[in-house]
Amino acid sequence: MPVRLHVNIDHVGTVRNARGTRYPDPVLAAQLCEAAGADGITAHLREDRRHIRDDDVVRLRQAVTTLLNLEMAATDEMIAIAERVRPDVITLVPERREERTTEGGLDVRAQRAAVDRAVTMARRTGMRVSLFVAPDAEAIDASAEVGAQQVELHTGPYCHACEPGTAAGRRREELRRLVDATERARRAGLEVAAGHGLTRANVGPVVAIEDVVEVNIGHSVIADAVLYGLERAVRDLRDAIARGVSLRARAPLG
């Protein structure tokens, strides 16, 4: 499959932490996702540890056999943890304690000093760097300037535009932003991933965009797993991605 599926297992930790139990275990969930065909595992270690915890990251590094992507803020604490644990990829994201989920893309220029420190550490230790950014020209250009290898385009606005009752043309407009950002990123030598809010129902047009090579999807996978089981949730999502990729011969906005 030309588009890699990385499953974010954060919300397995959310369920566990709601009752303060040892289960369900995010590490076991990661292994089940890999067995079902996931190409990588993503986990976000937040400042408040609301879902993934430090020990989870250590155990994930020991258990994951595909690829481990650690989402993190560009803080000294998280940079030190990443240097110690050595995930395969670090994805730098914006983070505010009061937000329910990540609400926007990273302002690379405003956080240039912190991003530079993270990139320097990653280069020294052999980790790849991805930046979670809005699909706009300034964010793409800034990502290339700091030496990232990849951008993950924020698909939240597109996903909101797919909801019933949204004004006609909004979905098409958001898809156009993603297409334009992908083309600009590729010209800048950046690999392009996409993520945030993607589901089986809306992922198709995103992966139909030429040069999108990876999606990071978590909440909808865990939501489906509650009803159908984790293995089926991953396999159904892979099937949806495959159907979307098959449309690449046509324009994604058509």
Image (cartoon, rainbow, N blue to C red):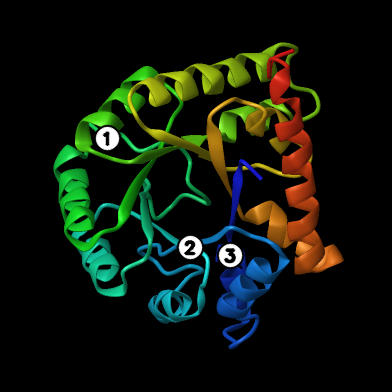
* Residue type beneath disc 3: Ile
* Residue type beneath disc 1: Val
Q: Local crowd at mark 3 within 10 Å, few (<14), some, or many (≥20)?
A: many
Secondary structure state at the residue bearing disc 3? loop
Q: Which residue is mark 1?
A: 108
Q: Nearer the viewer, mark 1 or mark 2?
A: 2
Depth check, front residue: 214 or 178: 214
Q: Which residue is mark 3?
A: 9
Q: Nearer the viewer, mark 2 or mark 3?
A: 2
Q: Position of residue 161 (x, y in %)?
A: 68, 25
* Mark 1 and mark 2 residues within 8 Å of each other at the beta carbon: no
Depth check, front residue: 19 or 242: 242
Furthest toward the bottom, the residue is: 22
Q: Position of residue 132 (x, y in %)?
A: 41, 41
Q: Residue at x 33, y 41 (%)?
A: 149
Distance, label 1 to label 3, CA atoms, is 26 Å
* Residue type beneath disc 2: Leu
Q: Is residue 229 visible?
A: yes
Q: Which residue is mark 2?
A: 67
Q: Local crowd at mark 1 within 10 Å, few (<14), some, or many (≥20)?
A: many
Secondary structure state at the residue bearing disc 2? loop
Q: Position of residue 124 (x, y in %)?
A: 16, 58
Counting residues from the start of the chain, the first of labels 1 and 2 encountered is 2
Depth check, front residue: 27 or 127: 127
